[in-house]
Image (spheres, rainbow, N blue to C red):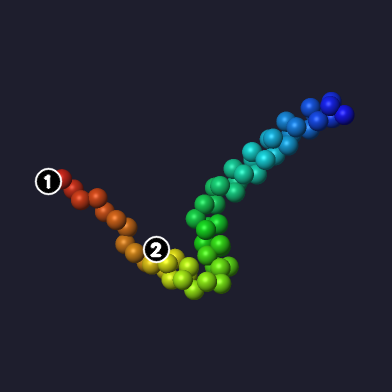
């Protein structure tokens, strides 16, 4: 049975690596979907504050 494991282990490792890479590439979309599905209203309020807030600008040195 060891030969069977040695045959499929690299394939499983490759499968997991490609699958997690695709999942990580979505990033903010996954977070948005999680927030959308959350029943807690506080989470929705915090999300709206985060989305609607202007981006922080770095003050220029003059």
Asked where in the image residue 51 lies, by quadrant, the reply is bottom left
Residue at (60%, 46%) from the top-left corner? 22
Q: Which residue matches tag 2?
A: 50
Could you tell whether 31 is left or right of 54 in the image? right
Asked where in the image residue 36 lies, by quadrant, the reply is bottom right
Q: Which residue matches tag 1?
A: 62
Q: Position of residue 49 (x, y in %)?
A: 38, 67
Q: Position of residue 21 (x, y in %)?
A: 59, 43
Is label 1 or label 2 in front? 2
Residue at (12%, 46%) from the top-left corner? 62
Task: Give the secondary structure at mark 1.
Answer: loop
Task: Give the secondary structure at mark 2.
Answer: helix
Local crowd at mark 2 within 10 Å, few (<14), some, or many (≥20)? few
The N terminus lies in quadrant = top right
Could you tell whether 58 is left or right of 21 in the image? left
Q: For the residues marked 1 and 2, what is the alpha-carbon distance in whole angstroms?
A: 30 Å
Q: Nearer the viewer, residue 49 or 21?
A: 49
Q: Nearer the viewer, residue 37 or 19?
A: 37
Could you tell whether 52 is left or right of 32 in the image? left
Q: Position of residue 13 (x, y in %)?
A: 69, 35
Q: Which mark is residue 23?
A: none
Could you tell whether 31 is left or right of 59 in the image? right
For this orientation, the residue located farthest to the right is 1
Residue at (73%, 37%) from the top-left corner? 12
Residue at (56%, 72%) from the top-left corner? 39
């Amino acid at each position: 049975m060891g030969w069977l494991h040695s045959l499929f282990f690299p394939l499983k490792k490759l499968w997991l690596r490609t699958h997690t890479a695709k999942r990580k590439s979505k990033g903010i979309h996954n977070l948005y979907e999680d927030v959308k599905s959350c029943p807690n209203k506080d989470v929705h309020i915090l999300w709206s504050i985060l989305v609607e807030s202007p981006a922080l600008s770095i003050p220029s040195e003059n």
